[in-house]
Amino acid sequence: MKRAKRIQGLSRSGTARVMERAAELRRAGIDLIDLTAGDPDFPTPEHIKDAAQRAIAENFTHYTAAAGIPELREAVAANYRREYGTDVEADEVLITCGAKQALFSLALALLEEGDEVILPAPFWPTYPALAELTGAQVRVLATHAEERFRVHPPQVERLLSPRTKVIVLNFPCNPTGALIDPDHLETIIHTALARDIYVISDESYEKIVFDRRPISAALFREENVIVVGSFSKNYAMTGWRVGYVIGNRRLIRDLVAIQSHLVTHPCSISQQAAVAAITGEQREVNRMVDEYRRRRDLLVEGLNRIVGVRCHLPEGAFYAFADFSPFLAGDSVSLAERLLDAGVAVVPGAVFGSDGFLRISFCHRQEKVEQGITRIAQTLSSWESDCDR
Ligand SMILES: Cc1ncc(COP(=O)(O)O)c(C=O)c1O
């Protein structure tokens, strides 16, 4: 029997594959330090869980509006007005089942066969998968560790073609933690606007920024700017599946039409929890970010102490993307597999379009991060002494 062409080239998420292999080993009783997942080890804050319990007790357990409950659309808009001084309104916001579904609906709404998408690498692997599902082609824009993985406007200009439909930006970036310079962001948006190209700015890690204030493409209120956000990482709510899109009203209407047929709407209870998250006390978020900063410093310092490994300081998110190229006896997948055999699970850079690197997640307890560094250091030095012999 014949499958659709669009599914034939689609493989499962590379991150999910490594995480599952690590889970298999753990189930088999193997002592493993697993630093693959991008899932905060903090519980969802109590006041958010209380709001969900109230929603259930009050029977808020039925269909809601397809675009999301008005309180949540307004709360997201108000957050952007407060944090960035923009004039976003509730009808420019769509609530989705996580940022992933937001991006899927955007791909359906904007892309078709023959379109081109400019995507900075290293990239989160879902972007190329979504582009390819629609028949669009990805044009990769390489960014470099020596430049803190920054995207520069001339690089974008060089990749523009009459077929370019979308430029994807992601900051803080998964996997590099890189941010973008606000003036570069503005230039890219205006260059794109002049050519009727959309800029999708995935800001799923918006609040997890360490050494400066978060920025958002929502600052630039142009027709072509689309912001994607999520409650998953910022509020330790990965399982609740709530995200959003901010965009022009016509786009939001199109996305609501897709959403109404795709998922109907995001879970009613999770939406009430998200209202509590975004309108409530932000102390817990600040506490989590402080803890991530401590773990980041520890991890990056530990990695840079290993001779041959180089790791820049991520400015946001909770991943270190470190250069292990001197240890590559093949590609980063085989390096990650060898480390897995030595009891530490990390994600190969190849998954993110950047071989030679490994992504090491620091949204895990400090002891686990410390044990991970020790294991990596011991394993690499044992390989070196094997080579010396
Ligand atoms: C850059 C980026 N965007 C979006 C997502 C998806 O987030 P959500 O849980 O809201 O679907 C992730 C999850 O890892 C991510 O890293």
Image: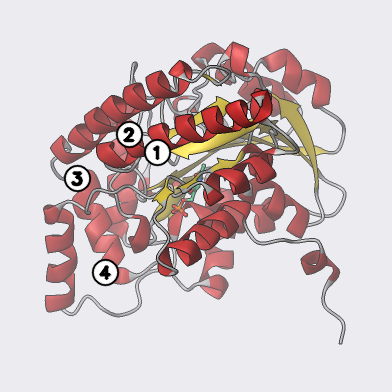
Mark 1 neighbour class, 10 Å CA radius: few under 14, some 14 to 19, many 20 or more: many
Q: Nearer the viewer, mark 1 or mark 4?
A: 1
Q: Do tag 2 and tag 1 residues touch (Cβ < 8 Å)?
A: yes
- SS for tag 4? helix
Q: CA distance from mark 2 to mark 4?
A: 37 Å
Labelled disc at residue 293:
none
The local secondary structure at tag 3 comes to: helix
Judging depth in this view, the residue of 325 and 283 nearest the camera is 325
Which kind of residue does numbered mark 1 sit on?
Answer: Gly
Give the percent coordinates (x, y) of residue 5: 85, 68
Q: Which residue is mark 2?
A: 370
Label of residue 279 in the image: 3
Residue holding disc 4: 269
Element marked by disc 1: helix
Of callouts 1 and 4, the N-terminal one? 4
**Side of 363 where 35 appears, left or right:** right
Answer with mark 3 or mark 4, whichever residue precedes in sequence.
Answer: 4
The answer to whether the residues at label 2 and label 4 have Cβ atoms under 8 Å apart is no
Image location (x, y in percent) of residue 337: 61, 48
Mark 2 or 4, closer to the camera: 2
Cβ atoms at labels 1 and 4 below 8 Å apart: no
Q: Where, quadrant-wise, is the N terminus in this rendering?
A: bottom right
